[in-house]
C-alpha cells in the first residue's frame, strides 16, 4: 500500500486582485494537522500597472504565515505594524480574537515591473487560544535554522524538526520545511525519521518519486504519517 494517501493539484482561486493556486482546503481533505489553508502565489511577472493588492480584511481564531520566494509585500495591520516582507523571511500573525490586515505591493514598486512568488498559509489555533489577544511577528531569513546535507538545503520555516526549532512562535506541534536540491542530480531523501504525525509534501518545482510513482509539480502529496521516502528530481 502506498504511503501517499491523497494527491491534490492546485486549483485557481482569487485573492483580492490576484489569482493563486489553492491546495487546501479540499473537498476530500479540509486540513493537514493544524494547517487549514494553503495558497501558492505565482510566480508571476507584474507590469507597471499591475500590483498585488489584498485590501484590509479581518481574521479571527487562527494564525497566518507568509513566506516569499521572490518579490515583496507590505503588511499593515490594526495592531499598528507596518513591515515589508522579502524572500526568505516570515510574517506570522496570530489573529486570536480578531485583527484586520492588508497586504499590498510596496509603494516604491507600484510603478515598476516586478515579480511575486510565495506561499500563504493559515494555521488553526488551539481552542483555548482562539480568543487571545492578537499579535504579529516578523522573522528574518538569517534567523531561521538552515543547513545543507549532501547538496540539499533545508530551511525550518516554522515549528520543530531535525532537533531544531524555528523562531516562529507557533502554538501547536507542527513543522514547515523548505527543501531545495541544489544540484542537477536526483537525490534520495528519507526524512520520515525526523518528522511526526500527519504530513504533506508540496512539490513546488521539479518531480518527486515515491515508491516508484513519479509526481509532477504544483501538487501536494498527503500522508497520514511521516514515513515518506522521497526521490527529488530536477
Image (cartoon, rainbow, N blue to C red):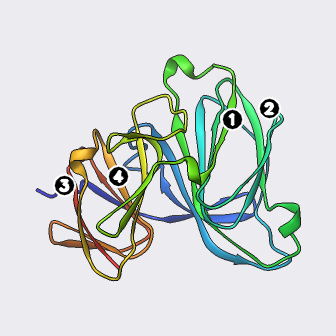
Q: Position of residue 216 (x, y in %)?
A: 35, 74
Callout 3 secondary element: loop
Which is closer to the viewer, label 3 or label 2? 2
The residue to which callout 4 is attached is: 200
**Cα–Cα gap, marks 1 and 3:** 36 Å
The residue to which callout 2 is attached is: 79
What residue is rendered at 59% in x and 36% in y?
Answer: 63
User: Is residue 126 rendered to the left or right of residue 187?
Assistant: right
The residue to which callout 3 is attached is: 3
Q: Position of residue 126 (x, y in %)?
A: 49, 24
The residue to which callout 1 is attached is: 136
Q: Looking at the image, do the residues carrying marks 2 and 1 touch, with CB atoms under 8 Å apart?
A: yes
Task: Mark 2: give few (<14), some (14-19) or many (20+) Cα within 10 Å.
Answer: few
Q: Position of residue 46 (x, y in %)?
A: 74, 76
Q: Earlier in the sequence, mark 2 or mark 1?
A: 2
Callout 2 secondary element: loop
Q: Earlier in the sequence, mark 1 or mark 3?
A: 3
Amino acid at each position: 500500500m502506498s504511503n501517499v494517501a491523497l494527491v491534490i493539484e492546485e486549483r485557481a482561486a482569487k485573492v483580492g486582485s490576484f489569482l493563486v493556486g489553492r491546495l487546501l482546503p479540499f473537498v476530500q481533505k479540509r486540513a493537514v494537522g493544524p494547517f487549514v489553508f494553503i495558497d501558492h502565489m505565482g510566480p508571476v511577472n507584474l507590469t507597471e500597472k499591475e500590483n498585488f493588492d489584498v485590501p484590509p480584511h479581518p481574521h479571527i481564531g487562527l494564525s497566518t504565515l507568509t513566506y516569499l520566494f521572490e518579490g515583496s509585500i507590505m503588511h499593515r495591520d490594526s495592531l499598528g505594524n507596518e513591515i515589508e516582507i522579502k524572500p526568505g523571511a516570515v510574517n506570522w500573525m496570530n489573529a486570536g480574537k480578531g485583527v484586520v490586515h492588508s497586504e499590498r505591493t510596496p509603494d516604491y514598486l507600484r510603478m515598476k515591473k516586478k515579480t511575486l512568488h510565495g506561499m500563504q498559509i493559515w494555521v488553526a489555533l488551539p481552542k483555548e487560544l482562539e480568543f487571545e489577544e492578537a499579535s504579529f511577528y516578523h522573522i528574518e531569513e538569517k534567523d531561521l535554522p538552515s543547513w545543507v546535507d549532501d547538496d540539499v538545503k533545508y530551511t525550518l520555516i516554522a515549528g520543530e524538526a531535525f532537533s531544531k526549532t524555528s523562531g516562529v512562535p507557533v502554538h501547536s506541534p507542527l513543522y514547515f520545511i523548505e527543501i531545495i536540491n541544489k544540484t542537477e542530480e536526483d537525490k534520495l531523501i528519507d526524512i520520515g525519521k525526523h518528522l511526526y504525525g500527519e504530513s504533506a509534501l508540496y512539490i513546488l518545482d521539479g518531480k518527486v518519486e515515491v515508491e516508484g510513482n513519479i509526481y509532477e509539480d504544483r501538487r501536494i502529496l498527503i500522508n497520514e504519517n511521516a514515513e515518506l521516502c522521497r526521490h527529488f528530481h530536477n
